Amino acid sequence: MTTRNFEGRVAVVTGAGVGLGRAYALELARRGCRVVVNDIGGSGAGVGSSRSPADAVVAEIAAAQGSAVASYDTVATRAGGRAIVDAALDTFGRLDIVISNAGFLRNARFEDMTDDEFDAIIDVHLKGAFYVGQPAFAVMKRQGYGRFLFTASSSGMFGHPWQVNYGSAKAGLFGLSNVIALEGKDHGVLSNAIMPIARTRLGDEIDWAWKNDASEVGAIVDELGVASSASRPWFGPEWVAPLAIRLVSEDSTVTQGIFSAVNGRYARVFVGAAEGWKTRDLPSAEDLAAHWGEICDVSRFDEPKSVYEEVLMVEKAFNRDEPVSV
């Protein structure tokens, strides 16, 4: 098995003062990577600021003979994103890896959510990934090497009540990662998204009253036991870190992927298009209703990697008996 050594590499990890980001930063540093530990030190609800979390992680890395520098800039502005990238370039002279992880929660019912609650989450999770990612991509493209990993969420892929802001932002990261993967592949720049479920301080921000609005999902939560994760060590951030390390390593050739780490299970998550029902005659809504079973049958499907690949797959589906991936 290849040992994933990061000697000579430089990583930016946003939101690295606590939780998942801290676990990523510590593991990268342990493997020889030089790390920019970015964190504004706010609460799980995005309130306040402090240099202590980032400084503590830098001190921990230094105590283990690693190399790191703290960054306290916000990801939520273009200037902040640029400053975070510059911290890597000014301190270490290059940038090879960006793990976009900064974020917080502000939950509310869909009908009650305010502009401030929605915009604040979009600004940090989605726009923050863009503001750090864009200048980092330019650096990586010039040097012919780079790795992006975006911390997305099952809330964006599968849904979570009272998290329309968070779910929307996290779903946006799938699109962001896909586009970077397409534009970066010919330049040695790979991009993937990770969907972790871990015990972090964000869990303290969840108002479990949402179960009154989504009884079916609430019943699953009750079956699992809301507090039971405390007795399950595999819900710790350190259980997610190995997947992150794998995806940003030099020997990984995976790009445009989505991967899940939850409850000790690691898996690829994919979006596919069913072969569906095909016609060259303009159909009516009634025609679609008559063929709804075929439209929803997922026993035959493809996984397009671009808009144009989906069109090509449909064209091929008209002339083949078995589905084939391009």
Image (tube, grey):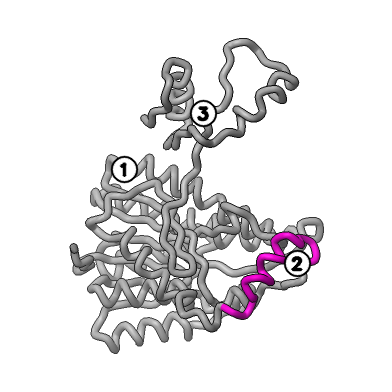
Residue 167, how many percent across, how many down? Answer: 62, 56
Q: Nearer the viewer, residue 45 or 324?
A: 324
Residue in view at x 29 percent, y 89 percent: 63
State the extent of the magenta-drawn residues as a range.
211-228
Looking at the image, is 255 positioned above or below residue 194?
A: above
Instruction: Check residue 275 in the rendering and tell me which mark sits there, or answer none.
Output: 3
How many numbered circles are shown?
3
Instruction: Check residue 211 in the rendering and tell me which mark sits there, or answer none.
Output: 2
Q: Earlier in the sequence, mark 1 or mark 2?
A: 1
Q: Which residue is mark 1?
A: 185
Calculate the distance from the C-alpha at mark 3 to the C-alpha at mark 2.
36 Å
Q: Nearer the viewer, mark 1 or mark 3?
A: 3
Q: Secondary structure at mark 3?
A: loop
Residue in view at x 31 percent, y 62 percent: 246
Residue in view at x 46 percent, y 21 percent: 317
Q: Secondary structure at mark 1?
A: helix
In the rendered structure, which amino acid carries the disc numbered 3? Glu
Q: Is residue 199 magenta-colored?
A: no
Calculate the distance from the C-alpha at mark 1 to the C-alpha at mark 3.
28 Å
